[in-house]
Image (tube, rainbow, N blue to C red):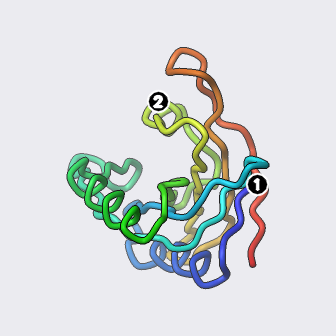
Amino acid sequence: MLKVPRSAYDSLRRHGEETYPYECCGVLLGRFEDNGTRVVTSIVRAGNTRTDSAHNRYNIDPRELVKIQREGRERDEDIVGFYHSHPDHPAQWSSTDLAEAHWLGCSYVITSVEKGKAATTNSFELLGTDESDKRLSDERIEIE
């Protein structure tokens, strides 16, 4: 399960609306609870560095990701997941999303943005032991 404060949930959905018709992306920071729940305490917007197909792909610059991770750790926050938008496409992961997901045990949140308005937001947990057996599984979002 993914627990998200209402303000962070609204912010990531708004981010998708602001970047429409291109994909937005960002990082979920927080903590892992013993029961496997990921608790989001803050989100950080990231720049989408894809220039070839930003309308249906995203990439976070590794240097930006390291900076976000470092700043989060200074506040006792870990990377617990990532988010991105699907402009005019369902909030369902694609084969590309799975191929480019590498943080096992993290949440991957997708918001469909239809004609500029955030619609459905879904979360998926990246399960598996390594790249050879990774898979995305539906995950419940609890908005606090």
Q: Residue at x 71, y 66 (%)?
A: 3
Q: Residue at x 32, y 67 (%)?
A: 71
Q: Position of residue 17 (x, y in %)?
A: 48, 76
Q: Nearer the viewer, residue 77 or 56?
A: 77
Q: Position of residue 7 (x, y in %)?
A: 60, 84
Report which residue position mark 1 lands on.
1
Amino acid type shown at disc 2: Ala
Q: Nearer the viewer, residue 95 or 100?
A: 100
Q: Residue at x 26, y 60 (%)?
A: 67
Vertical placement of residue 52 versus 25, above or below: above
Q: Is residue 58 left or right of 93 when viewed as pictured?
A: left
Amino acid type shown at disc 1: Met
Q: Position of residue 34 (x, y in %)?
A: 74, 49
Q: Position of residue 27 (x, y in %)?
A: 44, 61
The number of discs equals 2
Viewport quadrant of the N terminus: bottom right
The Cα–Cα distance between marks 1 and 2, rounded to whole angstroms, is: 22 Å
